[in-house]
Amino acid sequence: MREIKPADGTYAPPIALQREPAVKKLMKLSKIYDPREMNSYQFVAMTGLVMTILANVILLFIGKTVENFNALYLCWFVFFGAGTIANFNSKPEDHDHHHHH
């Protein structure tokens, strides 16, 4: 196979020989904990979790209880898990329009 040289004279291996670094093939764990890497489902689940915790603190402070209130934690966990699976299975260009700051 002959060497391909771009017009500027630098060497670039043929596209067939270029490989992604092994690190890129691994799951990007920052998609779990970094809000900038999360998709909308994960972001909504984290917001819901924070609001549920705050509501639970308020309920404890005023001495009230709500039946099955703690089931919300399971709901947010499942919602976050589904969003995480979708996030790991998406292509990087699928998230070019999502920005959570």
Image (spheres, rainbow, N blue to C red):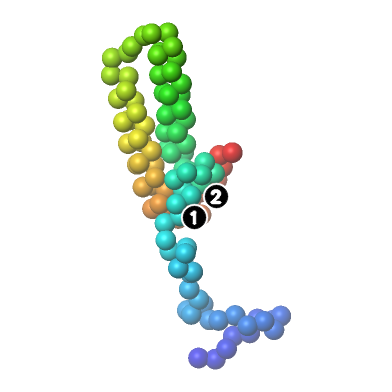
Q: Residue furthest right?
A: 8
Q: Which mark is residue 13?
A: none
Q: At which x and y percent is residue 59?
A: 40, 13
Residue 98, can we see it? no
Image vertical order of residue 78 relative to residue 50, above or below: below
- Residue, disc 1: 92
Q: At which x and y percent is residue 16?
A: 47, 79
The residue lying at 45 percent from left, 24 percent from top is 51
Q: Are marks 2 and 1 in contact (CB under 8 Å)?
A: yes
The residue lying at 30 percent from left, 25 percent from top is 71
The residue lying at 35 percent from left, 41 percent from top is 81
Q: Is residue 18 left or right of residue 7?
A: left
| Amino acid carrying mark 1 in the image | Pro
Mark 2 to mark 1 CA distance (whole Å): 7 Å
Q: Is residue 7 left or right of residue 56?
A: right
Between 53 and 4, the one lying in front of the other is 53
Q: Residue furthest left?
A: 68
Q: Quadrant of residue 63?
A: top left
For label 2, the crowd category at 10 Å Cα-Cα, with few meaning under 14, some 14 to 19 and many 20 or more, is few
| Amino acid carrying mark 2 in the image | Asp
Q: At which x and y percent is residue 13?
A: 55, 81
Q: Which mark is residue 96?
A: 2
Mark 2: secondary structure: loop
